[in-house]
Image (spheres, helix red, strand yellow):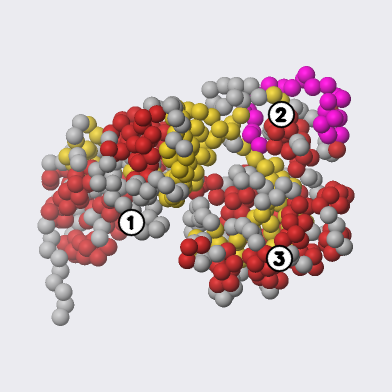
Amino acid sequence: MNAKPPVISGLARRLVNDGLIDEDTAQTTLAHSVRNKLPFALQLATDSQIDSLSVATAASDEFGTPLFELSALNPESVPADLIDQKLIRKHHALPLLKRGNRLFIAVADPTNLHAFDEIKFNTGKNVEPVVVEADKLSAAIEAFLNRQEESIGDALGGLDEESLDDLNIEAVDEDGPAADDGGNEADEAPIVRFINKVLLDAIKGGASDIHFEPYEKTYRVRFRTDGILKEVARPPSNLATRLAARLKVMSQMDISERRVPQDGRIKMKISRSRAIDFRVNTLPTLFGEKIVLRILDPSSAKLGIDALGYEDNQKKLYMDALSQPQGMILVTGPTGSGKTVSLYTGLNILNTTERNISTAEDPVEINLEGINQVQMNNKVGLTFAEALRSFLRQDPDVIMVGEIRDLETAEIGIKAAQTGHLVLSTLHTNSAPETLTRLLNMGVPAFNVATTVSLIIAQRLARRLCSSCKKPATDIPDEILSQEGFDEIGIDRKDIELYHPGGCPQCTNGYKGRVGVYEVVRITPKIASLIMEGGNSIQIAKLAKEEGFNNLRISALRKAASGLISLEEANRVTKD
C-alpha cells in the first residue's frame, strides 16, 4: 500500500499559494526533509528548487518573524560556547546575539518550536528566532563551528573571574567510586574559586606541574614553568585541610584517608571542544597532605617532530629508525626531560590503520586515538612484563613500554624486537652510551643489546630565549668560548650568535617555552662490535663521537650558538 503524500501546510503552503513552487515540488521536498531530518527551507535550498532569499522573505511574512541579512553579521560578535555544537548541527540554529535573558537565534524555519524549547532548556535563555537565508545559514554555521576548534590558550582567554564558579570540572574514575564527601566544607565557594583560579592560571602560564604544600605555619602554591619552580600564592595555613579535601573530592579520592598516598585524575572542560587532564597525587607530610597536579596537555603529543628541536641529521636518524619493521628505540633522560612527548610523537607518526600499536604505561598520561593503551596495575599483577607477554599474543606491529625497570621486562622487550616487532621504551640514564651499559648491567647479554637496539635518544629540555627581548651577548671573550667547547661544535666562530635573557611581559625572566636538546646515536657496526667486546660507556661515547653523533653538550652549544637558548641555560642542562 502506497504511503499517503505529506500534508502541505505552513511555509510550504505559503510558497505554493505565492506561486513560487508547485504542489508536487512541495510534497517531494517535504518528504525529503522528513527523511533527512532537515528543515523544509533548508531542504529546498539543498534541492535548489528556489532561491533562499524568496523562501526567507515568505517565511518572515507568514510567521511575523524578523528577517536578517547574515552577511551583515560580525563573526566576532557571535556568542561562543553558549549552545552545544550538537544542538547547533541538530537544529540548524546559529546564536546571533545575547541581550539580557534573551538569545536571538538565526533559523531558516521559524516553526521548529521543538528546537527553540531544547535550546531554551540548555541555555536558560528565552529564545527569539530570526529568519535568515538557508544557504547562508549553512555556511555561517560551518564557519562558526570551525572557529570553535581554537587553541587552548585562546579558549582560556575568554575565561574571567566571573567564570570561576562555572568551570566544568569532573573526576576521571579509575578505581571505582570514592567516598562521598557528604557536603564537606571543602565545597565552600571561596575554596572552589581559589582552586579553579589556580588551575586556570597554571594552564594560561604554561605550567607543567602545580604544587600545594602545607608547612607548620605557612602554606604555599608553586608552579613548575619551563622546568623551574616558582611560588605563586600563599593562602592562609589554616586552609590546608580544606584545600586538600577539595582537590581530593575533585579527583575522586577517599577524603577520609590521610595516612597513605593516593592517585587520581581531574578533567577540566575549558570549552565545548577542549579539555585538560590533571594527574593528581597526594603525599602525607608532617603538617598535612602535599598534593601535586601534573598538567596533561593532549596537544603536546601532537606537536610533530619538527616542533621538538631535533637537528636535521638527528631527525633523519629518528625517522629512519621508526621506518624499520623491527628493532628497539630507547629514549633516556631524567624525569621531566620530555621522554614521553618524544615517544608519543613517534607513535603518532606510526599510527596508521595498517599497524596494530599497543602501549604499556604507568601511568597513561595522554589518550591517543587508534592506539591500544594499557594502564599498569601492580596490585592485580598487571606489570610491564605481564603486559608485554599479552601484547605478543595480540598480533602487534609496534609496542611501546613506558619504562624498562628490570631484567624481565628488558628480556621480553628484546625478544619482541628480535621477532619482527618495533619496540619503543625509556630508561633513566644520563646519556646514550650509559643506556647501553645499563642494559648490560641489568643482565641482558651483550649480543642481544648489540643486535637489537637500533637507536638511542638521550634528551634534556632547555628554556627557550624569548624572541621579543633577548639581548646579544657581546661580552663573552673568545677564550671563554673555547673553554666552553665552542671549537668542537662545527660552526664557524663568526657565525656564532649568543644571547642573554632579557625580560618582558610576554615571558618569564627572559625565557618563553622550552626546546629539546638531544643526543641521537644509531648503533653502527663499530659500536655493536665494541658492545660485544665489553666496552664501557666512556669508550662507547668516544666512538659515537668519532662516528659523527653529537653528544648532549655539543647539541646544547649548537642551540646556544644559533640563539635559541642562552649559554647559561646550556650549562644548566648539560655541564657536569
* Residue at figure coordinates x 12%, y 46% from the top left: 62
196 vs 394: above or below? above
Q: Three-letter amino acid code at disc 1?
A: Pro
Q: Three-letter amino acid code at disc 3?
A: Gly
Look at mark 3 in the image and give the residue it sits on. Answer: 327
Look at mark 1 in the image and give the residue it sits on. Answer: 177
Instruction: Decide which of tag 2 and tag 3 comes sooner along the chain.
Output: 3
Q: Position of residue 304 (x, y in %)?
A: 60, 49
Look at mark 2 in the image and give the residue it sits on. Answer: 568
Q: Is residue 178 left or right of residue 23?
A: right
Q: Position of residue 186 (x, y in %)?
A: 31, 38
Give 323 or 454, whichever is nearer the viewer: 454
**The N terminus: image quadrant:** bottom left
Q: Is residue 476 visible?
A: yes
Instruction: Compute the Cα span from label 1 to label 3.
Output: 42 Å
Q: Position of residue 129 (x, y in %)?
A: 19, 42
Give 354 or 228, whichever is nearer the viewer: 228
Instruction: Decide which of tag 1 and tag 3 comes sooner along the chain.
Output: 1
Q: Which corner quadrant of the image does residue 94 belong to?
A: top left
Residue 480 part of the magenta segment: yes
Mark 1: secondary structure: loop
Instruction: Compute the Cα span from label 1 to label 2.
Output: 49 Å
Mark 3: secondary structure: strand
Q: Is residue 526 left or right of residue 228?
A: right
